[in-house]
Image (cartoon, rainbow, N blue to C red):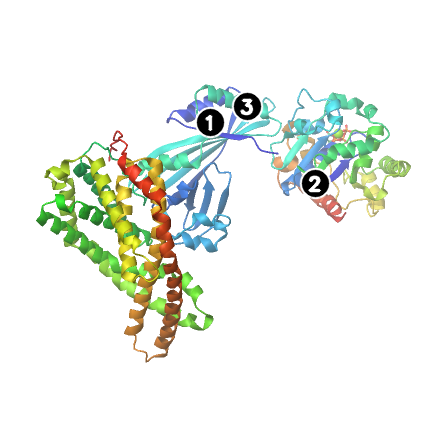
Amino acid sequence: MNTIAIYSSKGGVGKTAAAVNLSYACARRGKKTLLCDMDPQGAAGYYYRVRPKSKFNRKKFLKGKLHSFIRETDYPYLDLLPTHFSFRNLDLALDREGSEELKRIFSSLADDYDYLILDCPPNMTLLSENLIMAADQVVTPVIPSTLSILALAQLVKFFDKIKADRKKLHGFFSMVEGRKNMHRDTIKRFAKKKIFFRTMVPYLADVEKMGITRQPVAATRPGSPSAEAYDRLWMEIWKRSSRK
Amino acid sequence: MTQLKTSFAFRSAADPALFLEKIGEIGVVSRQEVQKECFQYLDTFDWHLYRKGWVCMRCGLDQYTFSNFLGSEVRAGTGPGNPVPLGREFLSTPLSKGLKSLFGIRSLLPCVDVERTKRFFLLLNKDKKTILRLCIEQNHCSWDGVSLDTGGCLRIYGLRGYGKSFHRLRKILTEKGLQEGCGEDLFLQQALAVRERLPLDYSSKLTVTLDGRESIAEAAQDIFLLLEEDMARNVPGILQDWDSEFLHDYRVALRRSRSLLSTLKKMIPETEYLTMQEGLKKISAITGPVRDLDVYLLEQESYRAMLPRSLQQGLKEFFAALEASREQEFKRLQQGLQSPEYAEFMDQWLGFVRKQFCGLTGTRGKQPCAAAAAKFIRKRLEKILQAGERIDEQSPDEELHRLRIQCKKLRYLLEFYRSLFSKESMATCIRQLKKLQDNLGSFNDLSVQQEMLSRYHEQQTPRSKKNLHIAAALGGLITHLQNDQQKVRKNCRKSYANFATDKHRALFYDMLAAPTIQEKKREAK
Ligand SMILES: Nc1ncnc2c1ncn2[C@@H]1O[C@H](COP(=O)(O)OP(=O)(O)OP(=O)(O)O)[C@@H](O)[C@H]1O
Ligand SMILES: [Mg+2]
């Protein structure tokens, strides 16, 4: 089983959009996939129309009894672990050895799934630290701007600080708008860097509309540029995951 | 992760609508696609698959699905393309993997044509999230110009994490009095209504239920009628040559009829007896040659195993020659069974059998069958015990053959009248007898085979190279069979001794002394 965390300390960069569409691409290719909504706002669950069961709580999550909270989406091979408000305090519950704890919790799912895709909340808390440590790959969306590049540099430093393996961190350019000079310049300067995946996700109305359709873009508009972009991005991630 | 799923069989044509209404109570029903599947159910004439808990479905020419009744085990794939495939043709395909025992020498016959309509539905909650998947299946079956809606079911598939809705719907439907869980066997059974048939409506085993109080004549009539039916039912399969067992079963029923007739000899007016005896004998002569050849052709594999590589070519040619003569004999058999003489005699035979008391007008025919049967059996048993005592390793072949015939006659009697005696004792007696029969039977088979091969050998004019090959192979076979026969012969004495122990004799006599009287269950036929 492979665990892939979609993470960024910044809000609104396209993490959830990526997690939702990448997990769909993964399942479409016949891999048993679990999308874990780690963000208490529950956006990933919202896109898949999956509400948490009312009895979900942190204690059970920590005890590793995840199975009974998982719900099937409308799509083959794709299940979802919904969030819950009590996630807000999950970081308080995890101690310094939290990543081991998380790994143990996730490993209880190894029989059922090929891939876990984590939609992480936008912060640099202890929870994020533990999620980063527990994941096999960390994928971070980067809006092509100077500030975002700075944030990425900070993230690399953060990896070093917590002694996480830098090699498992990759970025991709997200919400790319070709007509913006800033986007064009940033991409020109940084796109060749090893840390970036080749695929970029353009800014597209289809992705924005997911809030209304409540479906992954490839389900509403298969073959559309947005669907293709996430599929290609998934293939890059998949190649890395199968290399390990 | 085990998927939640269940099914509910329809009781009537109104059920699909009722189901949808009930389902509508827990969510919004969204119609999805409709699929049509056309297939045929197949089984052997004696329902071998069904007996083992399996059904076979065929789509198009050669797409087969074998599944157990509940569909928890399924094999699907390409199989033989002929309309009536032989069981053994499947052995070389992956379909038979782990299921060898399903495929024997019988052919799989189409039973009925099915058109299955599958209407898929989703059940959605207020977020328009799917919480259940549903399928309404309806079967429309046809055969020979008759077609009927035969039934169907609702299948419900739960989604992980949405078990509540699954259990809720299940409860609602169960409370409506619907039967949960339906297997393919139900649909097969329903489909057969088109042919006014039922699964397991034929077995090569004779099952007669007699009432001990009916007369020996009435009992004979019951048995004769069953045997006649068995013969008639096998004729189409013989004529179409679907597999060798039609002829085999036909001849078993014929032999049983002849044997029963001879038991009743003294009760039947002589001229009538002779006419019937002669007629049955003629049929036996018409049907014999093909069966004899079938026996060898079925032994092909074991013959092959008896000979070294150098003799295989000759054996192959020998079997090719046998196939050719079978083809000729088969034409004769077809003509025989379709001749006016055959039809005429069968009419006569039925007339004889149906005539009240089979024409057994004398007082003997009126005696209660239980007592008479016991007498017949006792007499036959005593003959065996007399003949058997004389058996040793030096006994001439004829004596062993005679003993074998006596045993066979006893076996027939036991099978005709088994319903009149204690079930357990009867089962043991038959089992013990069968052991002896098997031994004597293989002795006989071996000598018949040697004779046939020698005769064939002598008829050959060994001029051609091909004939030399055949002659060498036959020589090899005969030597092998002789050796086998000597081994079998050594066992005969012991087999008889095992059969004739004091304990077994007592079992026979005690059983015969106490017939069980039971109410007769007349089947509506
Ligand atoms: N490629 C895109 N094209 C157009 N709109 C996008 C794209 N990616 C994301 N969006 C939109 O931008 C908004 C923020 O995206 P998203 O929720 O995926 O970001 P996020 O990083 O998960 O945010 P948060 O930090 O709040 O969890 C959403 O309204 C989403 O529809
Ligand atoms: Mg988000």
Name the residue carrying label 3.
B167
Residue B148: percent from the left, percent from the top? Answer: 33, 35
Foreground pick, A242 / B34: A242
Secondary element at tag 2? helix
How crowded pointer 3 is (Cα within 10 Å; few <14, some 14-19, many 20+) is rated as few
Residue shown at 33% from the left, 66% from the top: B450
Measured Cα–Cα span from mark 1 to mark 2:
44 Å
Name the residue carrying label 2.
A230
Q: Are marks 1 and 2 on the same chain?
A: no
Residue B105: percent from the left, percent from the top? Answer: 38, 53
Q: Is residue A156 left or right of residue B94?
A: right
Which image quarter is the N terminus of chain B in? top right
- Nearer the observer, disc 1 or disc 2? 1
The amino acid pointed to by label 3 is His
Measured Cα–Cα span from mark 3 to mark 2:
37 Å
How crowded pointer 1 is (Cα within 10 Å; few <14, some 14-19, many 20+) is rated as some
Q: Is residue B38 above or below residue B335?
A: above
